[in-house]
Image (cartoon, rainbow, N blue to C red):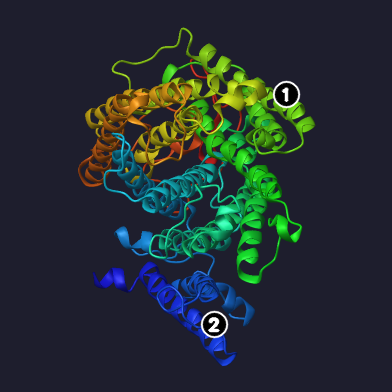
Amino acid sequence: MKKFFSSALARGLIWQVVGWALGAAFVTLIRILMGLKPLGIFFFTEPAWVFGGLVGAISFLAASGVISDWFKWAKGEETPEHHHDPDGWEKFINVSLDHKVIGIQYTLTALLLLVIGGIFSLIFRTELASSGLQFLTLQWYNTLMSLHGMVMIIGILLGIAGVINYIVPLLIGAQDMAFPRLNAFSYWLAPPAAVLLLSSLALGGFDTGWTGYPPLSARAPVGMQMFFLGVFVAGWSSILGALNTIATVARMRAKGMTAFRMPIFVWAAIATSIIALTATQLIGLSFQMVMFQRLFGMGFFDPAKGGNPILFQHLFWFYSHPAVYVFILPGLGVISELLPVFVRKPLFGYRWIALSSLGIALVGFLVWAHHMYTSGMNEYLSTPFMYSTLLVAVPTGVKFFSWVATIWKGKISSPIPTAFLFVLGGIVVFLMGGLSGPPNATVATDLQLQDTYWIVGHFHDTLFGGYVLPFFAAIYFWFPKATGRRMNETLGRIHFWLMTPSFIVLTLLMMRIGLLGMRRRIADYDAALGFDTYNLVMTISAFLIALSVLVFFINFFRSMKKGEPATGNVWNSRSPEWQVPSPMPAHNYDQPFEVVGEPYDYGLADSVYVRFAKEK
């Protein structure tokens, strides 16, 4: 425990609380001196809580030491290029400049948030297992439902950052990310953001759903402001991480690695980073405007003051629909990266798959208003947004056809490795999300489906197939590279066969009751509608998914110490990181390599992708 309390994480959390209290007290003192009412929830008023939350986040960053090098540089002091990381688990709760450590920090934080968000869903899913209010009040149901959405989204963003941070420099032959200190700073923004987000539970919660639409968000308790502030801070992490990824790929590729010799996951990372870099500001801006409306009486979204609540939806969805592609493009990249390894065939249509990621990213900026057909926006906007939304199916379809062609007549080993099971599961579940999407794009059908459980089922299929299952595939695949040990295949298969069929049942029933008329984001429903049995089966499915995640964690932590040693190329991959011993050396590649062939020419005699300097 002594090592934990002396760590950067512990110092940061302690000083976040101290800074929060000092910032709130400062505003309270000013209000007292001005003769204003000082009291509010837990003594502090809303402005005090918001300012204190901001000061607390800054205090976390200062106390953790993540900005210490920049202060030293400003004073003219020498700063080392690399920090000496402690041995063992302590390195993951301290500041490190090693992209591999940062990637694991992101991944572990993402897993923690996904567990928290999953627990929230189990609580309100249990409430929905039968009609009538069982044990949750309407306010608590709304708060848990709303937090489930945003906590899971932040967890997904951090998981994506973890995979990109760990894998991209290895795939392109770089020693680290282009800006190691900025990379560390990007990660250490995440813990205070998570604390701010979760603190909304203690400050009255909120009832808006994860979207935070005004006028509800303009009237919600103080917890709404913590929600906004947490997402705002997390958004900076996403923006800075995207900038770093683009710079790394643009400037640090190995000799001979032209654009169309890059691994396909790198293409996915670039497309993702372009979206995150250019669009994340919009959700931050929309949330900031509601914050200012509450704090300073500004009327951005208040019709009585000349504002327009639909403006919020335009700003919010301009980021939040492309954000869906931020979530799924890395997952689709993982599928494309791993598929040829396990079927022992070249990736069919490599260039088409690479360019389709950029196509999805581009078209994704032109579709946001399909979320707003029922909002009251000008009707003439519906038709162009309907066609642009349907157009997304073209680059997405390119990936599916390429995957099927790659699998066709492939040489798949038996038994199927767990990582490949999750790849196949991701393809199937994402296809379900894709096929259930066009009815939401066309105006006539969306008017009937909007805000029903059909939308919930479609959205979960898209995220689960496009991110969650590929995320697990990536963990099972690269775990030997990070630890030098393999995860247990038997436990891995139990994880897969518990999770995937249960999830398919869950989302199919969501879409079924949505077609029957059940609304989303409600805490109760009429027993006469006949939804009780459906909801009971959905709740059981949700708990089976939770059980599968428990099996995964048992496998994950057990394999770190007792897993089968795996120091060589355990997957017989052509990728450069598997050509060196595992776990990965501290500085990645002691010998630089040159790209001399195509990345996915599996099964072709005498084909070489990379050649290390010592081999010449």
Residue 258 visible from this viewpoint: no
- Residue 345 picture location, percent across and down: 49, 16
Specify the amino acid type for callout 2: Val
Tag shown at residue 172: none
- Residue 236 picture location, percent across and down: 59, 58
Determine the image quadrant of residue 218: bottom right
Residue 218 visible from this viewpoint: yes
Badge 1 is on which residue?
387
Give the residue at x 73% y 38%: 377
* 226 w.r.t. 595: above or below: below
Count the numbered circles shown: 2
Around disc 1, counting alpha carbons within 10 Å, would you say few (fewer than 14), some (14 to 19), or many (20 or more)?
some
In this view of the protein, which residue sits in the foreground, 78 or 611? 78
Q: CA distance from mark 1 to mark 2?
A: 50 Å
215 sits left or right of 133 in the view = right
Residue at the extreme right? 380
Around disc 2, counting alpha carbons within 10 Å, would you say few (fewer than 14), some (14 to 19), or many (20 or more)?
many
* 229 w.r.t. 58: above or below: above
Give the residue at x 41% y 59%: 198
Give the residue at x 55% y 32%: 610
455 sits left or right of 483 in the view = right
Badge 2 is on which residue?
27
Q: Earlier in the sequence, mark 1 or mark 2?
A: 2
Specify the amino acid type for callout 1: Tyr
- Residue 259 picture location, percent across and down: 68, 33
User: Is disc 2 placed on a helix, strand or loop?
Assistant: helix
Determine the image quadrant of residue 447: top right
